[in-house]
Amino acid sequence: MTPIFLFSLPRAGSTLLQRMLNTNHDVYTVPEDWLLLPFVMSLRKTGTVTNYGHTISTRAIKEFISLLPKKKQDYNNSLREFVLSLYTKVSPSGTRYFLAKTPRYYEIIDEIARLFPEAKLIFLMRNPIEVFASMLETWSGGTLKASHHFSRDLLHGTTKLYNGYLKHRTRSLLLSYRDIVTHPQLVAAKLEKYLGITFADLQFRNLRSIGKRGSLGDPTGQYRYKKISTEPLQKWHKTIAGSVRKHLARKYLLQIPEDVFSYSGVSKAQVLQEVQQLPNELQRLFPDLFYYLRGDLITRFNLNLLMKKEYQWTTQGVLK
């Protein structure tokens, strides 16, 4: 069993690519596995919120690893064998590849590359403004209500993906969402060469019924689009229209290096020009302004955790 790791941002088309790959019986997958994140993050002092004391846990695990005969090599070998055994057990007998698709794996690209030297690494890039608009539509009801939650994915995640590909490009395959929806057969040819397997005519293949195994993954596009469609390439114009949204979009886009755009198949100048030409949609002004200021306040004073019920453990179990 050889793993394929698909690295992308959330809402970047990874579910579509996953379903394309899953049309071949040599590839098995589940919507999102998330298996490696808690194990890899357990060795990092920051980046994790727990109610058991993550910093102390990290120190304890590292001290335990120091007692192993081959130190971290033993730990990594055991973790690798554990994950591969689970991928093998969940897959049909004789499956050649297990496709691991979890967007937040961009956080641990280097660790995955080290743990699985035989793995295939696929990097999927998409026009950043399309990703931003898709996040608003999918997770924020088309409003700016939750837009402040996306900044890590949009900025940090984009940089991690870009740097991860540059570091591991000699063993990786780079694809763009734009190419997938406009030239699926050319993308299929690249996949065939990289993986050593073949695909049927993906242009007209019904992908809607492929790979439905779990609650995670794309909650919208996989049901809306029966076949590969270029419609999402233009949908963002309607979502981003509005003076506040255009301001947010420009602010976001200006922080992304030009090279990242080139990998997604569009130019930064072109996207900025398209944003500038969008209408202002006056009916959106006041709600957008409210949510923008609210999000800025939450971000400025780090109020995210205080507003999430799953993190409000401090008032429970207190001696009275």
Image (cartoon, grey):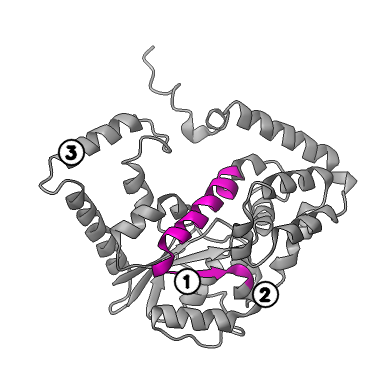
Q: Residue furthest top?
A: 320
Check residue 211 in the rendering and tell me which mark sits there, or answer none: 1
What residue is pinned by disc 3? 64
Task: Inspect the magenta stretch and tell me whether residue 177 lies in it.
Answer: yes
Q: Residues within 10 Å of mark 1 (few under 14, many from 20)?
A: some
Amino acid type at image mark 1: Gly
Q: CA distance from mark 3 to mark 2?
A: 51 Å
254 relative to 125, above or below: above
Earlier-in-chain disc, 1 versus 3:
3
Question: In what element is the residue under mark 2?
Answer: loop
Viewer-closest of 240 and 114: 114
Residue 101: quarter of image: bottom left
Q: Left of 208 or right of it: where is 275?
A: right
Where is residue 32 drawn, in percent x and y? 45, 59
Amino acid type at image mark 3: Phe
Viewer-closest of 150 and 315: 150
Residue 114: quarter of image: bottom left
Viewer-closest of 134 and 174: 174
The magenta-colored residue range is 151-178
What residue is pinned by disc 2? 229
Amino acid type at image mark 2: Ser
